Each structure stands twice: as structure tokens, then as C-alpha cells.
Image: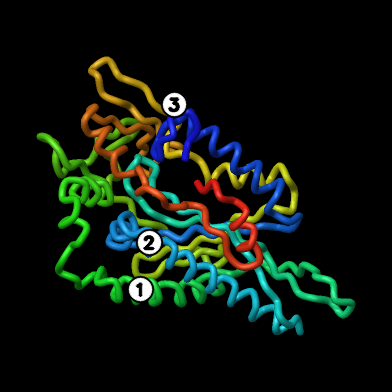
Amino acid sequence: MAFSCKGRGFCPSCGGRRMTERAAHLVDHVWPEVPIRQGVLTLPPRVRYALAWRHDLCTAVAGVLFRAAERHLRTWAQSRGLGQARSGAIIVVQRFGGALNLNVHLHALVLDGVFARAGDGRLRFHRAPTPTAADVADVLATIAPQVRARLARAGLDDDAGADACADAEPGLAGLAAASVQGVLALGGVAGRRPQRLGHGVGRTQDVACPAASPDRPHARWEGFDLHAGVVVPGHRARQERLCRYVLRPPVTGERLSVAADGQVVLRLRHPWADGTTHAAFAPTAFLERLAVLVPRPRVNLLLYHGVLAALGGLDAAGV
């Protein structure tokens, strides 16, 4: 929950304070002084839509992600003769994309190595080597089939005809489906994308995604994308900066302004490939984007795994 307004949504002031407090808590009471690697798992649009409604599936996918990452680390540890090795992670569920579109994806902050007992019985941390693109591809090849199997068991796979989400909340489901696709749902602009502003906009509207470099820990497969190229040392300031990044609110007041014609203008965090630096929304369109970013009641978007899981029980406030 946020602070003064006690809302679950997008208040920039409350979200910023929540981000600051939670990041300080993690570096002071949770993270050991060891390197942390960030893995970002992006999902196909159909999966994003399903996870936006079903938090139980969010937690299941987060578990799949951690187990696949830890299995890779434990395999490396066994090759080094390290028995009973364990790692840990904190996974943050983010619901928003750069243009306030509904984009449920996972940020996994994973210990960049394993803890194992030495001959004297003490736990020691062993740092893993930097993963290659092939390593990340192996992890992703484990994740994608398991996620699809979870959706199939829940009746939400790509071939499912019924949409329980639309049956329960047809209005909100329509807004969510449009937001996942990056288009607007209401008024005379339904089905269109928000107006783009910036130098050179429109020259390269369809920009192909660059192929993953074999030198970078990054892989794509069947709409799934896993990037593991960011690592920070066991340094408090660097860890806190990374925690603030993954815990940031959907939007800050500094990025919003109102144009002379009444449109709400959002400054993007990073320019897009076609030169877009801002997106403009009619007030109603802006509200429809915000409405689907609010998580459902009584869900925790901060999930603890592995050796850090016991600490999650001490952190009852949630995110």
C-alpha cells in the first residue's frame, strides 16, 4: 500500500516514497554484501493479459523463473564440487510499460552465485561466472514451456476460447486488452495508438528488433525475452540504486505535463527507435491507461525466493 492516500495505484508522490522506503529496507535488512544480477523476463502479449488478472499465475511464473535460474547456478556449483549449494532472489512484478501500457513483466534480482558450506561448516558465497547468451537461452528454454503449461492448466492458453476475465469485468477487460496491444479503447480514437511526439517521428514506424548478440546474456524465444546483463557488486549504494529502479512507480510528476489543447503529455524515460520522446493522451485516454495499472486488492508484488524466502515472512507490509 502507498502512504498518505492508501491507494494501490499510481500516485507519483506515494509511489516515490514507497520506492525509497522499500529499497532502503532491502539493502539494510535483506541483501547480503554479495553481487546481485538482474534478470528481466518479458512475456508474450497473451500471457501479459492473463497475468494482469491472475496474481496466482504471477507468483507461479515467478517461481518458474527463480527455479530455472537457481538450477543453472546449482549445476555450475556441482561442477565445482560444491554440494548443497543454494541461491536466492527477490522478484518484483511490474505492470507497466514505458508509455503507461499494461505490460506485466518480472524483474528478478538474483544473488550472482551460490552459498555452500565449507569444510569447517561455515557458509561461504561463491560467485558464478558471467552468463553467456547460450546460458540465458538454456534458462529461457526451461521457462517458456513451463509458463505455457501453467496457462493451459488454468484454461488460459493461446487456444482457449473462453475469457473468464471478460466475463467477470467486461469493461475493465476491454481496457486491459487494448492497453496490452498499445492502443486506446474508448471514444472516437478506439483502436488507434496514442499520438507520438518527437524529432523524426513517423520515419521508421516499424523498426525490427535487433537480434540478440552472442556476447550479451540475452535471449528471445516465441515471444519470451530474458535479459541478464545488469550486475551490481555487493555495495550498498549500487544495490539501493538497482532496487529503486525495479520498485519505481509507473510514472512521476516530472514526466507529466498538460498541453495548451488539454492533452496530457508523457515524457518517455528513453526515446524510442523511431524518434518518439513524448506520448500525448486525451484526458479520458490517459485515465483508461492508468485504470488497468492498478493491481487487484491484497496482492504482493514483491516476492522472495530461495535463501531469502524466510526474510519475506518478516516483511509483512508488501508492495
Q: Is mark 3 on a helix, strand or loop?
A: helix
Question: In the picture, residue 99 is in which quadrant?
Answer: top left
Category of crowding for the residue at label 1, using alpha-carbon neighbours closer than 10 angstroms: few (below 14), some (14–19), many (at least 20): some
Residue 32 in the figure: left or right of residue 279: right
Element type where label 2 sits in the image: loop
Q: In which quarter of the image is residue 71?
A: bottom right
214 sits to left or right of 24: left
Q: How crowded is mark 2: few (under 14 residues within 10 Å), some or many (20 or more)?
A: many
At a point 76% along the width and 74% down the height, the residue shown is 116
Question: Which mark, residue 253?
Answer: 3
Q: Is residue 39 above or below residue 251?
A: below
Q: What residue type is labelled 2?
A: Leu
In this picture, residue 35 sits left or right of residue 250: right
**Badge 1 amino acid:** Arg
The crowd level at tag 3 (other Cα within 10 Å; few <14, some 14-19, many 20+) is few
Residue under label 1: 150
Label 2 belongs to which residue?
A: 43
Residue at left offset 69%, top offset 68%: 113
Mark 1–mark 2 Cα distance, whole angstroms, equals 14 Å
Q: What element carries label 1?
A: helix
The amino acid at mark 3 is: Gly
Horizontal and vertical percent position of residue 143: 45, 73
